[in-house]
Image (spheres, rainbow, N blue to C red):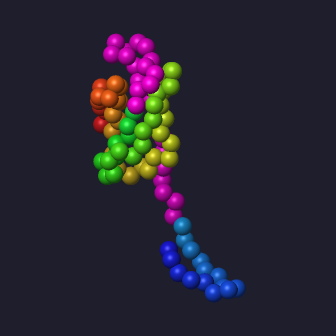
Amino acid sequence: ATGRVSAGGAATLTVRLQSVGSIGGRVLSADGTAPVAGVQVRLVSSLRGIVSQAVTGTDGQFLFDWVPTEGNYGLDAMYNGRVRARVN
């Protein structure tokens, strides 16, 4: 909202917070046994394209916080500059 309030005046505003959640996971080696560190994981929105990026830790885990709940998301796992896995 935009507008002006004179000195000593007041304005009433309604603010609606956006619904958000978290998306997290773990990247494992091709045989599914060992966590893989240093993998770039991209969060891709069907509405907005690439929303955020994270790099896996030594335990292979990643986390995206404050993700808007509207729309659908996918994850791309990038390793050595190439998409190695995609989940929709």
In the shown orientation, is residue 22 left or right of residue 4?
left
| Identity of the residue drawn at 33% across and 51% down | 48
Q: Nearer the viewer, residue 86 or 39?
A: 39
Looking at the image, residue 73 lies above or below residue 6: above
| Identity of the residue drawn at 34% across and 12% down | 31
| Identity of the residue drawn at 35% across and 25% down | 79
Looking at the image, the residue that sits furthest to the right is 8
Q: Which residues are magenta?
A: 16-40
Looking at the image, the residue that sits furthest to the front is 81
Looking at the image, residue 31 lies above or below residue 56: above
Say which quarter of the image contains residue 42. top left
In the shown orientation, is residue 44 left or right of residue 68?
left
Please provide percent x and percent y for residue 66. Answer: 50, 47
Q: Nearer the viewer, residue 30 or 78?
A: 78
Please provide percent x and percent y for residue 81. Answer: 32, 29
Magenta highlight on residue 72: no
Say which quarter of the image contains residue 35. top left
Please provide percent x and percent y for residue 58. Answer: 51, 21
Please provide percent x and percent y for residue 28. Answer: 40, 19
| Identity of the residue drawn at 30% across and 37% down | 88
Q: How many marks?
A: 0
Which SS does the magenta portion mostly show? loop
Residue 78 visible in the snapshot: yes
Residue 85 visible in the snapshot: no
